[in-house]
Structure formats: structure tokens, C-alpha cells
């Protein structure tokens, strides 16, 4: 029998809550089999485990779950991988642009904070000299 996993197995392996895994299932990223009375027990396949791993990687890259699902679904299809790779490059380029823009904004804010720190130190130094003349 192929490797299968319980929801607890995946939650522990990927340091997630079972609720998060059920959310990914609701989003269509995972498709576990059902077993037990009334199909209450989820049985995840190696495919589900790989899809979860790819979903978490996509999240780390800043992709939305919808973007992640679109890309992962393309890899599931038996077609030529060229279009999938091109789509992935487009998505990565857009996220790189967003991150670079955020980085520039953060750098500008950091520069402003440094300027205020320098001005405040200077004012504090002047105030200290005025109250404690040598």
C-alpha cells in the first residue's frame, strides 16, 4: 500500500494546526480519501503531502493560496511543463517586484528614522550642555 498520512501526521510534520490543513482542503489544495464511520477520518496520500509542501513553499514566496493552487494544479496535469514554468516565472517576477517595492519603502522609512535619531541626539546633547555648563 502506498504511503498514507493522517491529518495529525501532516500537522506534526509541517508544524501546522489540523484546522489549517482542513482549510487547505476546503480551498481544494488537498483531496484526502475518507474512511471510517461516515467517512470521518481523512487519509492523505503522498500526492496530498507533496501538494501541502508546495503550498507552504508558495506561501513563503508570498503567493496567495489561489495562485498556489493554480500553479500546483498545472503541475498535476500530464501536459508539457513549458507553460507551467513560464507561468511560474511570471508569478515570481511579479512577487519580486512587489518585494523590491516593499524593500525600497522600508529603506526610506529606516533612513527617516535614522535622521530623526540623529536630530534628537543632537538636541539632547545641546540641552544637556545648556543645563550642565562646563
Image: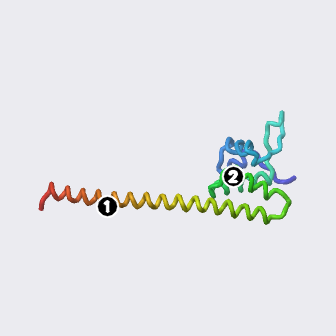
Where, by quadrant of the figure, is residue 46 drawn? Answer: bottom right
Which residue is nearer to you in this view: 116 or 8? Answer: 116
Q: Which mark is residue 118?
A: 1
Label 1 element class: helix
User: Are the residues at dot 1 and dot 2 in contact (C-beta closer than 8 Å)?
Assistant: no
> Neighbour class for label 1 at 10 Å: few (<14), some, many (≥20)?
few
Where, by quadrant of the figure, is residue 23 drawn? Answer: top right
Q: Which mark is residue 28?
A: none
Q: Nearer the viewer, mark 1 or mark 2?
A: 1
Which of the two labelled residues, at mark 1 and mark 2, occupies the earlier sequence position? Answer: 2
> Which residue is most to the right?
1
Find residue 78 and report its horizontal and vertical position in percent. 85, 59
Residue pictured at 58% horizontal, 58% vertical: 98
Which residue is nearer to you in this view: 10 or 126? Answer: 126
Q: Assign the C terminus to one quadrant of the image.
A: bottom left
Q: Is residue 126 left or right of residue 14?
A: left
Find residue 20 and report its horizontal and vertical position in percent. 67, 44
Residue pictured at 60% horizontal, 62% vertical: 96
Residue pictured at 48% horizontal, 58% vertical: 105
The residue labelled by disc 2 is 13
Rendered image coloring scheme: rainbow
> Which residue is most to the top?
38
> Neighbour class for label 2 at 10 Å: few (<14), some, many (≥20)?
few
Amino acid at each position: 500500500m502506498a504511503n498514507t498520512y493522517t491529518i495529525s501526521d501532516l500537522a506534526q510534520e509541517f508544524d501546522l494546526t489540523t484546522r489549517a490543513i482542513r482549510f487547505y482542503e476546503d480551498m481544494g489544495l488537498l483531496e484526502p480519501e475518507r474512511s471510517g464511520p461516515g467517512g470521518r477520518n481523512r487519509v492523505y496520500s503522498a500526492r496530498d503531502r507533496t501538494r501541502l509542501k508546495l503550498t507552504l513553499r508558495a506561501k513563503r514566496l508570498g503567493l496567495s493560496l489561489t495562485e498556489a493552487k493554480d500553479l500546483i494544479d498545472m503541475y498535476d496535469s500530464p501536459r508539457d511543463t513549458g507553460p507551467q514554468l513560464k507561468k511560474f516565472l511570471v508569478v515570481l517576477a511579479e512577487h519580486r517586484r512587489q518585494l523590491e517595492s516593499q524593500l525600497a519603502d522600508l529603506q526610506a522609512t529606516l533612513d527617516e528614522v535614522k535622521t530623526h535619531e540623529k536630530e534628537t541626539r543632537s538636541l539632547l546633547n545641546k540641552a544637556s550642555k545648556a543645563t550642565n555648563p562646563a
